[in-house]
Amino acid sequence: MSAGGDHLITLPIMRAIAKERPVGMVHFDAHCDTNDEYFGGSKLTHGTPFRRAVEEGLLDPKRTIQIGIRGSMYTENDWQLSYDSGMRVITIEEYFEMGTEAVIAEARLIAGDGPTYVSFDVDGLDPVYAPGTGTPEIGGYSTFDAQQMVRGLHGLNLIGGDVVEVAPPFDPSGNTALVGATMMFEILCVIADSIAERR
């Protein structure tokens, strides 16, 4: 389990844990992070890690679900790889239409029984719950919904996870740091159970 930092930290983690076979992923975020480049042409930024992971054979896109996608600063082309490669993209509108339980069921179906990584970007949450992040996007899910979704991953073959994009200086109240730490605890609990069940 790792703490970020921006979302690029997931790429070297995947290089370590997916050496032998690609992993699936349950990805909570407002953004797909499958841009080809970002910040004036850079190929390695917080907006590009999952494109690089697919290109390097680390991430199995057909076993990847991205939950909460939205945002006005992007175009569909920025995230086209997600769709073209077979990732399941659940926009925030679809999330609210489906409801939390149906999204959990979809995540479980897509992850299947293969090794699966959990990546939680706090900007997937509505910024009323986590304002201390670099690219906040209004209209997200609540902290309770996020807890329910993570708990709903219990029993999957979870092999690692991260919580990223917490920027405490942007939130003097300290609430975002609390949210980040709590979501890390939630993910650690389901990973610990998964490891125990495999032993």
Image: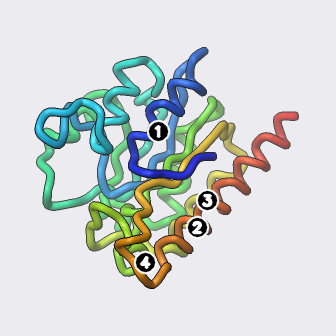
x then y, percent, for residue 78: 17, 41
Q: In which quarter of the view is residue 184 placed?
A: bottom right
x then y, percent, for residue 65: 43, 43
Q: Is residue 4 left or right of residue 76?
A: right
Q: Badge 3 local density, few (<14 within 10 Å), some, or many (20+)?
A: many
- Residue nearest the viewer, comparing 163 with 149: 163
Give the alpha-carbon distance from disc 1 to disc 4, as whole Å: 23 Å
Give the numbered dot on residue 184: 3
From the image, state whether disc 4 or disc 2 is nearer to you.
Answer: 4
Give the alpha-carbon distance from disc 3 to disc 2, as whole Å: 10 Å
What is the secondary structure assignment of the residue under circle 1? helix
From the image, state whether disc 1 or disc 4 is nearer to you.
Answer: 1
Q: Badge 4 local density, few (<14 within 10 Å), some, or many (20+)?
A: some
Amino acid carrying mark 1 in the image: Thr
Q: Is there CB contact under 8 Å for labels 1 and 3?
A: no
Tell me what residue is drawn at x 14 percent, y 45 percent.
76
Residue that label 1 marks: 10
Residue that label 2 marks: 147
Q: Is residue 126 visible?
A: no
Tell me what residue is drawn at x 41 percent, y 73 percent.
130
- Residue nearest the viewer, comparing 169 with 44: 169
Q: Tell me which label, 1 or 3, sits earlier in the chain.
A: 1
Residue that label 4 marks: 129
